[in-house]
Structure formats: structure tokens, C-alpha cells
Image (cartoon, rainbow, N blue to C red):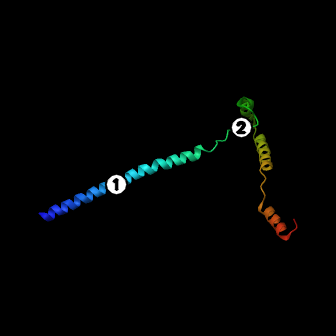
Amino acid sequence: MKRVLKALGQTLSQSILLVCMLAFIALAGLAVAPNQAAHAAGQYSSQAQPEAKITDPAESFEDLNPQAAYEDIVKTAQNPAKVEKVYDESLKEYKEEHPQESIVQKAEELIEKVTGKE
């Protein structure tokens, strides 16, 4: 009988210890989690937010005249020869705005730089 009571007391004390440890871990987690969120919020709120800027040259939507642009696109799409011409013009403008050097050009520049001809 002593053994049974001793084993029961030991099991009871271990279960109480386990419950206390779990409660301590939960409280520690609750204490740490708000600090992290508050720290992250403070990090972003202290930075100044940049103002939105209009990158389009037209000052407002009315200046863009979407109806006229739509009609121009419809007229262009109805004539296949004109579509190709508009595409070539658009591609040419894009390449002028975004020049890309070929591998050969880059290699020539590197050779000139290494040989000291530049």
C-alpha cells in the first residue's frame, strides 16, 4: 500500500510540475510575442513614407483622352500593314529608350580596357 501511495504521489507531483512548466512556457511566449510585434511596428512607423508622385507627363486622367486612344488603336488594328508599321516604330522607340549592349560590344570594350587603348 505504501508503494502505491508513493507512486501515486510521485505521479501527481510530476504532473503538477509538468502543468506548471507548460504554464510558464505559455506565459513566456505571451510576454515575448507582443514585444516583437511592437518592435516591428515601431521600425516601420518611424520611417517617413514617400509621397506619391505622378510619373506620367499628363497631369490628370482627362488630359490622357482614353476614348481617342482607343479609337486610334481600333483604326490601326483594322489595317494589317499599318499594324506592322506601328509595331516597328514602337520597337524602334523602345530600343532607343532601352539600349542593350550585345555580348560582342561588351567583349570589345573589355579588350580595349585590358589592352589600355581606352
**Residue 88's disc number:** none
Q: Quadrant of residue 6?
A: bottom left
Q: Earlier in the sequence, mark 2 or mark 1?
A: 1
Comparing 115 with 85, the one in front is 115
Can you tell which quarter of the image residue 45 is in?
top right
Q: Which residue is mark 1?
A: 22
Residue at 50% x, 50% y is: 36
Amino acid marked by disc 2: Ile
**Residue type of the residue flagged with mark 1:** Leu
Given residues 17 and 54, the one toward you in this image is: 17
Say what secondary structure mark 1 lies in. helix
Q: Which dot, 2 or 1, sits closer to the camera?
A: 1
Tell me residue 90's x, y (percent).
77, 44
User: In the drawing, what numbered circle is on residue 54?
Assistant: 2
Q: Are there few (<14), some (14-19), or many (20+) residues within 10 Å of tag 2?
A: few
Residue at x-position 77% and y-position 55%? 100
| Residue farthest to the left, as pictured | 1
Residue displayed at 78% across by 50% down: 95
Name the image quarter holding the C terminus. Answer: bottom right
Locate residue 71: give its quadrant.
top right
**Residue 5 percent coordinates (x, y):** 15, 61
Within 10 Å of the Cα at label 1, are there few (<14), some (14-19), or many (20+) other Cα atoms?
A: few
Instruction: Give the Cα distance between marks 2 and 1.
Output: 55 Å
Q: Is residue 93 above or below residue 58?
A: below
- Is 15 drawn above or below residue 51 in the view shown? below
- SS of the residue at dot 2? loop
Q: Is residue 106 above or below residue 86?
A: below
Q: Position of residue 85 (x, y in %)?
A: 79, 43
Indicate the quadrant containing the N terminus: top left, top right, bottom left or bottom right: bottom left
**Left/right of residue 112 with respect to residue 43 in the rendered view:** right
Of residues 1 and 89, which is closer to you in this image? 1
**Are the residues flagged by discs 2 and 1 in contact, CB closer than 8 Å?**
no
